[in-house]
Amino acid sequence: MRSSTPRDLSGLCPRCFLKLDLCLCSQLTCLRSNLQIVIVRHVREERLTSNTGRLAALLLSNVRIVPYGGDEPFDEGPLRGDDTWLLFPDAKPAVPPGRPQRLVLLDATFRQARRMYRKIPGLRLLPQCALKGPEQRTPGRRRSPRSDGLSTIEAIATALAQFESPELAAPLMAAYAEFVRRADLARGRKRPHD
């Protein structure tokens, strides 16, 4: 279910977008990573309470969110640089040789991401990689139309585990699980494991 926040953020934390009494921000620890992460976020994702790119940016010091869509022209500058790869689910080969210095992710629905890929020429120039997601998945805020579909924060955690350190992935996934739990509480739902 796609959800959005009220324009005035009434009753919500302006950082994590959870209800104020369920805010997660005080429990988030800033993690340092050598891998730079660029999240190209579709404009329709910006106000969704279920957006996990926002959560990743709160947790990692080396994340930059670049908006796509709306009235402003898209700046392809953050896509340029040595060893910049695009994390894309349909990439062939799954992982190119070497190791990225910067990883670009599209924060959008699969349909929006495919359109973004077609409309942003700089994305098609990047080496692409597709990573197998974690074996144990956190039930997310949204249902993916694909069995291999990952939320943005799951994709980042998987990439960090593979290209840098599995120890960086664990706190991201723990924060994501807690984010989902609190968001469910805000909606009056409990997961079976609660």
Image (cartoon, helix red, strand yellow):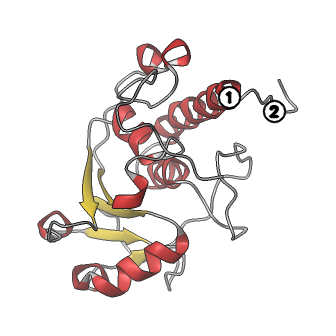
Q: SS at mark 2?
A: loop
Q: Position of residue 58 (x, y in %)?
A: 36, 33
Tell me the quarter of the picture where residue 97 sits. bottom left
Mark 1 = which residue? 181
Mark 2 = which residue? 191
Q: Is residue 144 above or below residue 21?
A: below
**Are the residues at dot 2 and dot 1 in contact (C-beta closer than 8 Å)?**
yes
Residue positioned 69% across, 69% down in the render: 145
Image quadrant holding the C terminus, namely: top right
Label disc, if present, on residue 20 of the rendered structure: none
What is the C-alpha distance between the residues marked 2 and 1? Answer: 8 Å
Q: Position of residue 28 (x, y in %)?
A: 43, 21
Query: Toward the viewer: 181 or 7?
Result: 7
Residue positioned 81% across, 32% down in the render: 191
The residue type indicated by label 1 comes to Arg
Residue positioned 59% across, 53% down in the render: 2
Residue 83 can be seen, yes or no: yes
Q: Is residue 101 above or below residue 147?
A: above
